[in-house]
């Protein structure tokens, strides 16, 4: 699915220290992209950047910080001289029953999953021209919620709607905005759930494909959306979930991406 090369193009990838963000960074690098990698986990992020050599720089940042968006974009452009795409992969999951929900948890989840990527995208826009691509990593939970995950589901649903709104604003400029909605993927976000064999088995049984997905499988779609192979794809949301949101099956606890 790779499509055209990314030689000479600069892509900013958040959440790049692990999981889907890291897999996406590595996949884009293999197609020749130069990468501005962003994460709050400094040591892990620097290790990923170093493994990619001169094609990547590590930008350690907390996207909840109001000043972070402009600073991250400025550093990326300073390092490479231009910017052609953004992959908003950073995200957080906190689960609790609605009766136990705190304002602090709500603000954190919505801040990292929605507010952060929105304003990072806004900061990047002055540097993006026709042919540029913006990708948001949402979740199957945008349309199929799970117990104790109401705010997480709301945040991912907001991203899917945001993609449509941004498309209305940016399509006339030739800037494509799309979303990827992963299902249960083996990432650090699910590490606690997967540590329990019963929960892991329940998750697998809830997926029509009969298994959990890998970050690399999501990265292949991110690659397609960043390249010119997807030049007529605007405002779409793609499920990478083994059929989870297409076929009804018994709800599995903790089945968030």
Image (tube, rainbow, N blue to C red):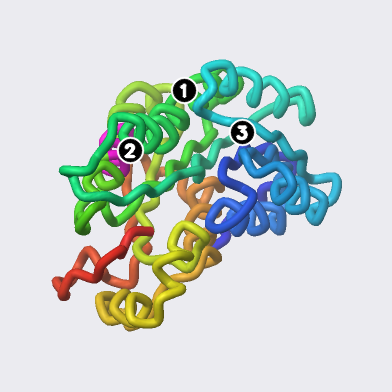
Please report whichever mark, 2 or 1, sits nearer to the chain's N-terminal start.
1
Which secondary structure, mark 1?
A: helix
Quadrant of res 41: top right
Q: Is residue 151 left or right of residue 183?
A: left
Q: Position of residue 114 (x, y in %)?
A: 38, 33
Q: Does residue 162 belong to the magenta stretch?
A: yes
Tell which tag, 2 or 3, sits nearer the viewer: 2
Q: Which residue is mark 2?
A: 159
Please provide the residue range marked out in magenta. 155-163
Kindly report the distance in space between the C-alpha atoms of the residues bearing marks 2 and 3: 21 Å
Q: Please give the name of the residue rendered at 62% of the width and 37% of the height, measured from the top-left corner.
A: 12
Q: Are marks 2 and 1 in contact (CB under 8 Å)?
A: no
Q: Which residue is mark 3?
A: 84
Count residues near mark 1 (Cα–Cα under 10 Å), then give few for <14, some for 14-19, many for 20+.
some
Q: Position of residue 90 (x, y in %)?
A: 50, 43
Kindly report the distance in space between the C-alpha atoms of the residues bearing marks 3 and 1: 17 Å
Is residue 197 placed above or below 75 in the rendered structure? below
């Amino acid at each position: 699915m790779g499509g055209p090369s990314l030689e000479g193009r600069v892509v900013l990838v958040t959440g790049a220290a692990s999981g889907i963000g890291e897999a996406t960074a590595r996949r884009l690098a293999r197609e020749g992209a130069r990468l501005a990698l962003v994460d709050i986990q400094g040591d892990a992020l620097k290790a990923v950047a170093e493994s990619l050599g001169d094609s990547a720089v590590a930008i350690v940042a907390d996207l909840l910080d109001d000043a972070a968006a402009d600073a991250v974009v400025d550093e990326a452009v300073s390092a490479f001289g231009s910017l052609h795409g953004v992959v908003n992969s950073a995200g957080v999951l906190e689960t609790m029953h609605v009766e136990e929900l705190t304002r602090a948890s709500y603000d954190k989840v919505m801040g990292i999953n929605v507010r952060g990527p929105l304003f990072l995208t806004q900061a990047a826009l002055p540097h993006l021209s026709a042919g540029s691509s913006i990708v948001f990593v949402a979740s199957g939970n945008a349309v199929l919620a799970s117990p104790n995950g109401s705010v997480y589901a709301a945040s991912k649903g907001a991203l899917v709607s945001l993609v449509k709104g941004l498309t209305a604003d940016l399509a006339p400029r030739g800037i494509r905005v799309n979303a990827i909605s992963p299902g249960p993927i083996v990432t650090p976000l699910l590490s606690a759930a997967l540590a329990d064999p019963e929960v892991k088995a329940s998750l697998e049984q809830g997926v029509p494909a009969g298994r959990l997905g890998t970050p690399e499988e999501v990265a292949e779609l991110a690659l397609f959306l960043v390249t010119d192979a997807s030049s007529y794809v605007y405002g779409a949301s793609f499920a990478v979930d083994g059929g989870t949101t297409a076929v009804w099956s018994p709800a599995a606890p903790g089945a968030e991406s």
